């Protein structure tokens, strides 16, 4: 693989080499407590650091959102993505300049039970980026099911700027959600399908369209 060059022309290489940070990121079904009553069935990213800075994976207790991934410009990062979903998936690192093989193109989607290894040379400047699934035709439903997470890059320029840090630097993710009366996610606007009793049903065939069930807005 050709090294990816940062804005300053400095090469950051990882493929075949020794990464500074190594992470395992799983996508899997889970349940979270969002509303009173039944927990909501979601799909969620869960991560762990295999090598390097333990702060590279920051869990968000009680959330379905994936962990916040924290990297520094110039780091060589390797991520083992493991698909524990019941359908193909792949991860795209939104906003990062990466080699084509690490970009999460839909044609690279892996089947359930498979692992995709990303070599990410972090060449971006400091900023808030995010990661999300990117399989063909299923990106929207997978994101709506809960698969998304922040990816925050810091660098020397940011750290010398004297910005508020740690507990004064709070990343916020705003999402618009609709739930059925059992506290389950439904997404008519995005997918034209709804989850009814745990199954995807075309909106026009659903009991929501016929008025038998009511949508709750939160
Ligand atoms: Cu994107």
Image (spheres, rainbow, N blue to C red):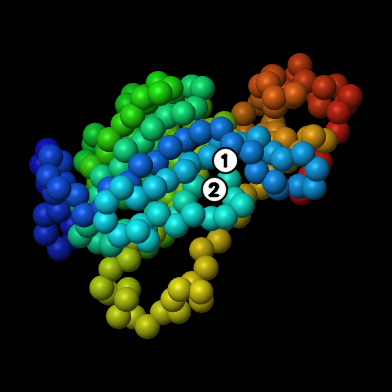
* Residue 204 in sight from this viewpoint: yes
Q: Residue at x 31, y 47 (%)?
A: 50
Q: Secondary structure at mark 2?
A: loop
Question: In this image, 216 relative to 1: left or right?
Answer: right
Q: Residue at x 28, y 68 (%)?
A: 155
Q: Is residue 155 above or below residue 59?
A: below
The reply to whether discs 1 and 2 touch (Cβ–Cβ < 8 Å) is yes
Q: Looking at the image, is mark 1 or mark 2 earlier in the sequence?
A: 2
Where residue 193 sits in the image (x, y, percent)? 67, 25
Q: Quadrant of the N terminus?
A: top left
In this view, the residue farthest toward the bottom is: 162
Question: In this image, 54 relative to 1: left or right?
Answer: right
Image quarter of residue 78: top left
Image quarter of residue 114: top left
Q: Residues within 10 Å of mark 1 (few under 14, many from 20)?
A: many
Q: Is residue 212 above or below residue 55?
A: above
Question: In this image, 16 relative to 153: left or right?
Answer: left
Q: Residue at x 24, y 34 (%)?
A: 101
In this view, the residue farthest toward the top is: 205
Where residue 196 sits in the image (x, y, percent)? 74, 24
Q: Secondary structure at mark 1?
A: loop
Q: Which residue is mark 2?
A: 65
Q: Residues within 10 Å of mark 2 (few under 14, many from 20)?
A: many
In this view, the residue farthest toward the right is: 212
Q: Residue at x 86, y 28 (%)?
A: 213
Disc marking residue 86: none
Where residue 9 sits in the image (x, y, percent)? 11, 59
Disc marking residue 146: 1
* Residue 4 in sight from this viewpoint: no
């Amino acid at each position: 693989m050709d090294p990816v060059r940062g804005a300053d022309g400095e090469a950051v290489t990882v493929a075949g080499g020794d990464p500074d940070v190594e992470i395992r990121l799983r996508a899997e079904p889970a349940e979270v407590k969002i509303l009173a009553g039944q927990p909501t069935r979601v799909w969620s990213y869960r991560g762990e650091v295999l090598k390097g800075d333990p702060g590279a994976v920051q869990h968000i207790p009680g959330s379905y959102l994936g962990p916040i991934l924290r990297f520094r410009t110039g780091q060589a990062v390797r991520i083992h993505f493991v698909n524990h979903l019941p359908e193909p998936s792949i991860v795209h690192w939104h906003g990062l300049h990466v080699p084509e093989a690490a970009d999460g193109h839909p044609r690279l989607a892996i089947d359930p039970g498979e692992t995709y290894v990303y070599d990410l040379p972090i060449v971006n400047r400091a900023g808030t980026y995010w990661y999300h699934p990117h399989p063909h035709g299923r990106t929207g439903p997978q994101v709506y099911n809960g698969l998304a997470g922040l990816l925050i890059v810091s660098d020397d320029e940011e750290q010398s700027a004297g910005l508020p840090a740690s507990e004064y630097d709070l990343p916020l993710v705003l999402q618009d959600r609709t739930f059925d009366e059992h506290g389950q996610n439904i997404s008519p606007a995005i997918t034209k399908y709804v989850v009814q009793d745990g199954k995807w049903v075309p909106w026009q065939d659903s009991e929501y369209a016929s008025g038998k069930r009511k949508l709750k807005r939160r």
